Image (cartoon, rainbow, N blue to C red):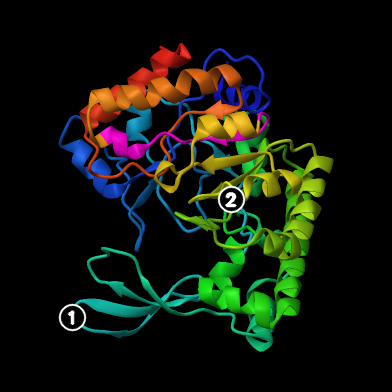
């Protein structure tokens, strides 16, 4: 059974020869540590993208639209499954903004990033950027962004190698998704306006929020209708990140008003095109959102952050047919073999028996995790899943 077959059977809650073996990803500094502890370094070692220290694992849709590199060394050394691939269309800004430096001092730069946000970043690329402004502040700036970078120029949004990709996808042995980029009915708006700006806009100008959601839905349906006329896809991935440690960033009422109608349009479109796996990426405590996601037609969620209060065992009990990916506490990987055993023993056998589950850590693997403990953790998952 190949990776595509495993993914589809797992997502359908059907019997499978073993689980699909993936991780979401790693910090670049984690891989640097592991190279000194036994992970073999090759000429294909990923270099982090500018301004990012993330390296994609097999569970992260790739190619990433913002250029996040992909791991190959951990995948090959530990015989993980081939990664989830993403049809590399431009599903948001096209073209991106040209990155430029507006001012700088000895330690920092103020830049315009590729999404149009102005931010202060450290020259050593440490820490998080400080966002100073965003491209959409009202109708005039939205209409300018829409007319310059969000037009229905469908063919130009396809990759140059589109004909070759069509041929490759027809014989693939890996799962292929659409979406998986800067798409989502909270994540995309937050990227345009910033979190605070979006919250004010929900109250001050809801008509503008709806206009943006309507336009983006029309754009995505037109784009993916074109893609799916020539390619079969196995899943659609939304990117939201709409929760934090204490709970959802928006209320159920706001979800129903500003997101639910557009989710339903998208999920109906996808279902009409035979896509049964519609999965959303959101960090944080998303208990309040899970029933709303299902009401909207979404079928799965990841990564179930444990330190935010998420528990995949409890989620499976509450939502028997929800596809669940991730949910293993990355913090225990830095502690001891006993801590790893306790985490895996409580969750993995139960979840694999229930089905619809892909076991991996609840976000990127941080650099406090040793290669020894990571290898042990992956070997235990392999044993529990009956893999070799």
What is the x, y in percent for residue 98? Answer: 47, 75
Find out whether residue 328 is within the magenta segment.
yes
Q: Earlier in the sequence, mark 2 or mark 1?
A: 2
289 versus 4 height, above or below = below
Res 114 seen here: yes
Question: Residue at horizontal 68%, vertical 45%?
Answer: 291
182 versus 130 height, above or below = above
Residue 177 shows which numbered tag?
Answer: none
| Quadrant, the C terminus | top left
> Is residue 356 toward the left or the right of residue 362 in the image?
right
What is the x, y in percent for residue 154? Answer: 73, 61
> Is residue 123 toward the left or the right of residue 231 in the image?
left
Label 1 environment density (alpha carbons within 10 Å; few <14, some 14–19, many ≥20) = few
351 versus 368 height, above or below = above
Circle 2 sits on which residue?
Answer: 88
The front one of 330 and 248 is 248
| Quadrant, the N terminus | top right
> Is residue 325 toward the left or the right of residue 259 in the image?
left
Element under label 1?
A: loop
Determine the image quadrant of residue 129.
bottom left
Residue 106 shows which numbered tag?
Answer: 1
Q: Residue furthest right?
A: 272
């Amino acid at each position: 059974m190949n990776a595509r077959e495993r993914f589809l059977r797992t997502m359908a809650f059907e019997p499978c020869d073993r689980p699909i073996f993936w991780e979401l990803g790693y910090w670049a500094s984690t891989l640097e540590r592991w190279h000194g502890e036994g992970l073999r370094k090759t000429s294909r070692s990923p270099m982090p993208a500018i301004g990012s220290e993330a390296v994609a694992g097999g569970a992260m849709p790739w190619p990433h639209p913002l250029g996040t590199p992909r791991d190959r060394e951990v995948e090959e050394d530990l015989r993980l499954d081939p990664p989830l691939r993403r049809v590399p269309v431009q599903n948001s800004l096209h073209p991106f903004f040209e990155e430029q430096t507006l001012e700088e001092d000895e330690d920092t730069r103020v830049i315009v990033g590729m999404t149009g946000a102005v931010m202060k970043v450290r020259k050593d690329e440490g820490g998080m950027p400080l966002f100073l402004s965003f491209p959409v502040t009202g109708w005039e700036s939205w209409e300018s962004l829409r007319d310059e970078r969000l037009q229905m120029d469908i063919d130009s949004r396809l990759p140059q190698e589109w004909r070759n990709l069509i041929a490759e996808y027809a014989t693939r042995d890996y799962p292929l998704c659409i979406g998986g980029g800067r798409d989502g009915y909270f994540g995309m708006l937050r990227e345009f306006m910033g979190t605070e700006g979006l919250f004010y806009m929900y109250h001050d100008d809801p008509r503008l929020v709806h206009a943006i959601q309507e336009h983006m839905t029309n754009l995505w349906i037109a784009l993916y209708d074109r893609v799916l006329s020539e390619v079969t896809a196995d899943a659609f991935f939304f990117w939201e990140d709409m929760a934090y440690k204490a709970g959802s960033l928006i209320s159920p009422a706001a979800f129903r008003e500003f997101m639910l109608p557009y989710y339903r349009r998208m999920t109906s479109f996808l279902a009409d095109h035979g896509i049964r796996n519609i999965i959303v990426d959101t960090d944080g405590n998303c208990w309040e959102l899970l029933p709303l996601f299902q009401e909207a037609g979404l079928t799965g969620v990841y990564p179930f952050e444990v330190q935010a209060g998420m528990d995949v065992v409890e989620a499976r009990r509450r939502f028997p047919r929800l596809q669940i990916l991730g949910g293993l506490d990355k913090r225990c990987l830095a502690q001891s073999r006993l801590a790893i055993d306790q985490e895996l023993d409580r969750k993995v056998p139960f979840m694999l028996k229930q089905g619809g589950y892909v076991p991996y850590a609840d976000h990127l693997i941080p650099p406090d995790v040793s290669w020894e403990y990571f290898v042990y953790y992956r070997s235990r998952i392999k044993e529990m899943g009956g893999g070799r």
